[in-house]
Image (tube, rainbow, N blue to C red):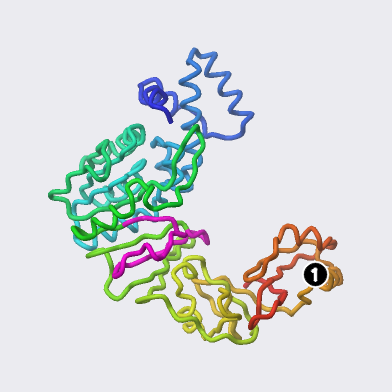
Amino acid sequence: MERDELVRLLSAEGLSLLDSLPPYSSRADVVKTVADLRKQGHDAGLVAAVLSQSRLRSRARTKFGEFSDRMLFTEPGLEQATRLRVAALHAGRFARAGLRHVADLGCGIGGDALAMAAVDLEVTAAEADEVTAAVAAFNLTPFPKVRVLHARAEDVALGGIDAAWLDPARRTTTGGTTTRLADAADFSPPLDFAFGLAERMPVGVKLGPGTDRELVPRGAEAQWVSVDGDVVELVVWTGALARAGVGRAALVIRGAGAHELAGPADAEDAPVGPLGDYLYEPDGAVIRARLIGDLARSMGAWMLSEGIAYMTGDREIDTPFARGFRVIERLPADERSLRRALQERGVGTLEIKKRGVDVDPAALRTRLKLKGDETATVVLTREEGRHVAILVERL
């Protein structure tokens, strides 16, 4: 979003017009809306600005629910913003640690600061980008204990502040195109600065779930979070925000429930054994946290093959930490025989899951030339190092 666009939005006419729009829907409806607004005398720049915000508000409902209807967004800010439910868990950790004044350094559009303010924390929020800082100030206006600064994280005075939260910007936008930054030194603020603060105060740092594990400081708690099967973040907690004895954690949020698997360090893998009656695929957060071995042992299961994140066992286990499948039968692993086996079973719709094999499921599905009324799920992986194809059904 450009500065001029934000100025238009923040005018009385802009905000009133934005709030009057129906929910963003199809492109055809948008074309009609543009025509109607232009007939009402609104200038083209304002119409474009409010429709862009209407689209972002619609997308933001998955993260902010009904709160999105009274917020403003930037494209990269929404992309990186924490889901409100997850932000509430972050805020709760600060509150439980007795930390009352938090610096949100690199606050983006203000999602985490909003959650902190909701649990009555005092927040000093800072954002280096002028437009994004203004958007955050608008979104946080209802909270008198929040102060928003247009400032770099490195320039914020931290006297009287108990702890810091950082969500370093990991994307850059040039010419309307947003790209991810690969080097942690290019983050804003840089990761060295973020972890350097841990020597002064308790710190929480939100990172992408695929962040190099070698960057996690020794002695910190690393918590991977998944929401409905999608791993959304890694949070590194230090000082009073880190839990004693917890070095690795997987927080799994599904529907209305939240469950956590934690350990002091990476878990040793469970022993490898042959395919049992059931196959289990750990949640992505468990895989990222490298706690598969602990999960397998708690379930009485074993690994299907070394280095592959499938577990197997002879008991049906209901766990939030893994998806379960009942093993129906082994199928031939080579493509020609697999095609024949599926044709004999009348399989026309096939879900292909794979780990540890170099296969493009979409391309393979095309080559199998499936015909029939039956649906099936096939897992392509390794069993004790050997290629296998396993016909399964979801539990």
Q: Position of residue 84 (x, y in %)?
A: 39, 50
Q: Say which element carries label 1.
A: helix
| Residue 273 in magenta stretch | no
Binning the other alpha carbons within 10 Å of mark 1 as few (below 14), some (14 to 19) or many (20 upward) gives few
Apparent side of residue 315 relative to residue 20 in the rendered image (left or right): right
Q: Quadrant of residue 144?
A: top left
Outermost residue on the left side: it is 160
Question: Is 206 included in the stretch rendered in magenta?
Answer: yes
Image coordinates of residue 279 in percent, x first then y, are 62, 77
Rendered location of residue 308, percent (x, y): 58, 75
- At a point 66% along the width and 77% down the height, the residue shown is 382
Q: Is residue 368 left or right of residue 245?
A: right
Task: Give the total number of marks visible in the rendering.
Answer: 1
Residue located 50% across and 28% down the image: 51
- Residue nearest the observer in this picture, 33 or 310: 310
Answer above or below: position of 38 versus 234: above
Residue 318 or 123: which is nearer the viewer? 123
Q: Nearest the camera: 213 or 34?
A: 213
In the picture of the structure, the residue carrying the numbered disc 1 is 335
In which quarter of the view is residue 76 placed? top left
Part of the protein shown in magenta: 205-231
Residue at x 34% of width, y 36% of height: 129
Q: Position of residue 245 (x, y in %)?
A: 30, 76
Question: The N terminus lies in which quarter of the figure?
Answer: top left
Residue flagged by tag 1: what amino acid is it?
A: Glu
On screen, residue 143 versus residue 276, left or right, reads left
For image coordinates 64% across by 29% down, the residue present is: 28
Reply above or below: 352 against 27. Answer: below
Q: Quadrant of the C terminus?
A: bottom right
